[in-house]
Image (spheres, rainbow, N blue to C red):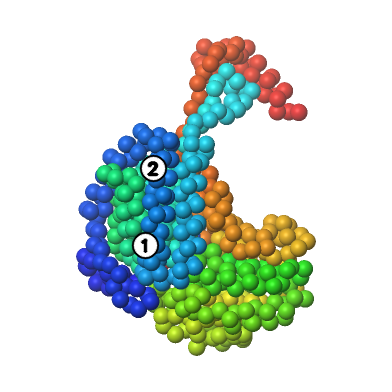
Amino acid sequence: MASTADPRATELVSLSPVDSRPVAAFPVDDEDTVRRKVVRAREAASWWRTIGYDGRRTRLLEWRRVMALRLPEVLDLLQRENGKVRADAVIEMTAALTHVGWSARNARRVLSRRRVASGLLMLNHLATVEYRPYGVIGVIGPWNYPVHTPIGSIAYALAAGNAVVFKPSEYTPAIGRWLVDTFDEAVPGRSVFQLTTGDGTTGAALCASGVDKIAFTGSGATGARVLAACAPSLTPVLLELGGKDALVVAADADIPAAVEAALWGGCSNAGQSCAGIERVYVADPVYEEFLTLLAQRAGEVQGGTDFGPITMPGQLDVIRRHIEDALARGGRAVVGGPESVVPPYMTGPVILADVPEESAAVREETFGPVLVVNRVADAAEGAERANASDYGLGAAVFARRGAGELADRMNAGMVSINDVLSFPAVPALPFGGRGRSGFGRIHGADGLREFTVPTARTRKLFDVPLAASTYARGARDMARLERIITWMYSR
Ligand code: NAD
């Protein structure tokens, strides 16, 4: 948590959501400071590029080694500055370290120059494509996964050959500092990966600083501001925004497994996951069984023990509003209710049933351990309702027969079958959404390419007796080309 109420403040202090005590103080970097860092990053980028894929791979794997050796420090910080319980912190670091390794090991294979088919009409040319780094990437991060989320941009951008200037959330600057410090230990004396701290003003300064691309993760409202700020300079933007992910449970699903998945998918990290489960649509024949078992299991999960406090105090008001609105519109609280909101915690999960689809708890991102469980006639109707959302980040389906077809119906960037939130842990898979969940991809080969400029090249190997694209051509050349394309494309 941070105190930056004064817009002219030159310092921000991050406060622990656990006890509101200060964790660390950081400068609020102004425009000049941010620009200077970007200039330094540009110089560093040319060295980083010259060491090639192998040089970067070695250094990124060394960074991962340093982070693994210093793991207890960051786990403590994730607990203290972000409020996670230890288990959530361990899960976050497991995924983050996996991605650093995958990006380092796969950059050469995915990005280096490769031959593509030239096609019959250009068979006298050798055609190749390579993916060149942009130069300097500005990464703006959120607080909810202050390591895993920005690493999805930082590690992939670095592996692709870019330098990075990283602005962590004002709620988690000390965790951002730790990331840059561990990198400095692995790659000393260079400014390939730098930190800039501050609130939204510093983020806006990074957008206008001359970086070659912005990778933004955060809320849709801020994402729109970032897009607007980058428009005048035509700076490309990657937007990883919010979600309202749904789980669809078919009548033949393994109900105990679906219940466990719904509960963990909705409550881990205190429900503060962009791709956390917030809505569950259960087929009528198994609805009562699902709800009864979910209520029983949710009653055994406790805030403060199984998940930590809500990191941003203001979010508790949003959570309370969503619960109250759902009840006012005729929904039922099966477990917990407005009384579960006891700052800084949610005392436990809140399970709401039969909530009208126009309710805020169905339409807007709640970002707390609250699950809406609604009855549908069958899984097909569940998919239809799941898709009737402005968001389209992730989704999950539980079914025995026809699970693949059900997954095909989901309008989301990522789908888990018979599990939840599996996709971010598979480094080769792209991560990102559609609609109001943003565009562009982190992770996997697409995530590496996201931080590059695809660069095409042709090399003429020999002359052919058909000089169509020179003024040395004759009428017979063009007539021959006419006959060739008619023959090729009319069959
Ligand atoms: P936020 O939008 O409030 O802030 C995100 C970052 O943007 C912070 O670093 C903030 O300082 C900065 N910022 C604020 N104003 C800015 C401006 N005008 N210009 C540039 N930067 C500015 O989001 P948050 O509360 O930190 O994060 C929670 C949100 O992030 C949720 O909506 C969540 O779903 C989303 N999220 C998405 C993903 C994903 O991969 N899709 C991952 C994690 C979180």
Q: Position of residue 339 (x, y in %)?
A: 50, 88
User: Who is closer to the viewer here, 59 or 291?
Assistant: 59
Quarter holding the C terminus is top right
Quadrant in the picture for residue 141? bottom left
Q: Which mark is residue 364?
A: none
Quadrant in the picture for residue 453? top left
Q: Position of residue 111 (x, y in %)?
A: 49, 37
Secondary-structure class at tag 2: helix
Q: Earlier in the sequence, mark 1 or mark 2?
A: 2
Q: Position of residue 18 (x, y in %)?
A: 38, 76
Secondary-structure class at tag 1: helix
Residue at position x 53%, y 44% in the image: 445
* Amino acid type of the residue that numbered disc 2 sits on in the rendered structure: Arg
258 vs 293: above or below: above
Query: Label 1, label 2: how many angstroms apart (C-alpha)?
Result: 21 Å
- Which residue, given by chain and number where applicable, does mark 1 sit on? 73
Give the crowd class for mark 2: few <14, some 14-19, many >=20 residues within 10 Å: some
Quarter holding the N terminus is bottom left
Give the crowd class for mark 1: few <14, some 14-19, many >=20 residues within 10 Å: few
Is residue 220 visible from the viewing direction of this image?
no
Horizontal relation, residue 364 to residue 354: left or right:
left
40 vs 125: above or below: below
Q: Quadrant of ligand 1?
A: bottom left
